[in-house]
Amino acid sequence: GVVVSGVNRRPGSRVSLTAEDRRTIALISRARLSLGLSDSTSEVHNLLALCTQPLADWLPLPEVLEQGLGPVRLIDPVELMPTLEAEGLAEDVAGLASLVEEQLFGDFREALAKLTPAQAEEAYTAVRDFVVRHPVVHMKELESFLEDLPSGVANRVRLGFYEPLAARLDGSEGVALCSRCGNLTKTHAGGGWLCTTSACQQHGTAPMKPGQPAVEHFRLTRGLRQYWLEPGIDEVLLFDALKAHGVAPRLYPHRDRVDIDLGAESGVGLDLKAYASPELLGRRLKKRAGGLAFYAQRWLVVPDWLANATPGYMDRLRGALGAGPIQAMTTGQALERAVALKNVKPGQETTGA
């Protein structure tokens, strides 16, 4: 696959599509014409707008549908950022996926690199946990958290992770937050309030916290909302559930080697993924196990809401994974299995699927 990249206007830089971009657009236009569709994608803005829709709606090539890519969106329609699925597809396009990550987290990783490994791991987990749990935060609470971080890391978070929040999304002078994830809420067309975190919405409605003045409140920047907050909702919910059941999990161990593991000596690593296409997810993990490769038991965990909403999701995912060492399960199944492992006596451990 190929991805058309955006270009930032910066003094002294050339602002235009590259030759590779134009070849990509030409290929997409030819594909649409072969399907009897219009050549609207020859204009890059039209193409990028279509990328916010599922591929099945605008590029229903047999190859796309056969590989289970029909429901995949390349650009998030709310945040207007590349989706995690787009990153997965772009892994083989040299430098593209790493470019997005470098722009968002390069300075943060540089600050961590100046610490000892143990300090860096502790700071990374603390920052990421705080960010996911505080998509909107009052200045005093943010500064209180930053006081306990190494100064270099604190400065990176202070300058690059949050932006001032001027007003509530409905235009009124206040902040109304979701009581589950802490993000902004907005009025719903059918009445009432709706959380602006897509992953949080999947868990049903949650009460709105009382409104408060927006002055001195900060909101996560768009990139962090897309790449840390959205996937982080289900990660921290499972982490909290594991702790509540007496398990001793670690969140984002070894600077995000995996999302969760069950302790330094457990040999069990969990990665949570919420891909619209189980086939794409299975193929990606089969090809590159990532941090799971460091664990004897490798659990690929899918949110219950996604597995329940997509017919045959888990069977399709396991089929794409094949008979390798990675075990696919839902968040509910992962919780049950982790609790069962906690209750196993020494010498009775099993790695059965």
Image (cartoon, grey):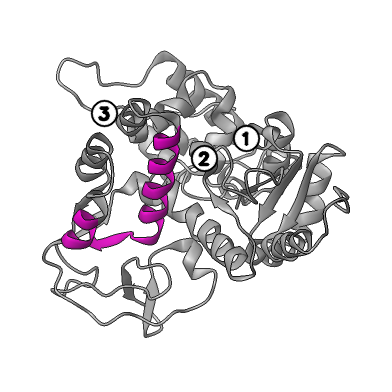
296 to 207, vertically: above or below: above
Of callouts 3 and 1, which one flags the residue occurring earlier in the amino acid sequence? 3
Q: Nearer the viewer, residue 331 or 154?
A: 154
CB atoms of marks 3 and 2 within 8 Å: no
Which three-letter amino acid code belongs to the residue tagged 3?
Asn
Mark 3 vs mark 2: which is more N-terminal? 3
Q: Quadrant of residue 240?
A: bottom right
Residue under label 3: 8
Residue of label 2: 256
Q: Residue at x 32, y 48 (%)?
A: 222
Along the viewing direction, whichever of 194 and 271 lies nearer the viewer: 271
Q: Residue at x 31, y 73 (%)?
A: 177
* Residue 52, position as x, y percentages in the image: 46, 48
Magenta segment boundaries in residue numbering: 118-144
Q: Name the residue nearer the viewer: 36 or 223.
A: 223
Kindly state the secondary structure of the residue where label 2 is placed: helix
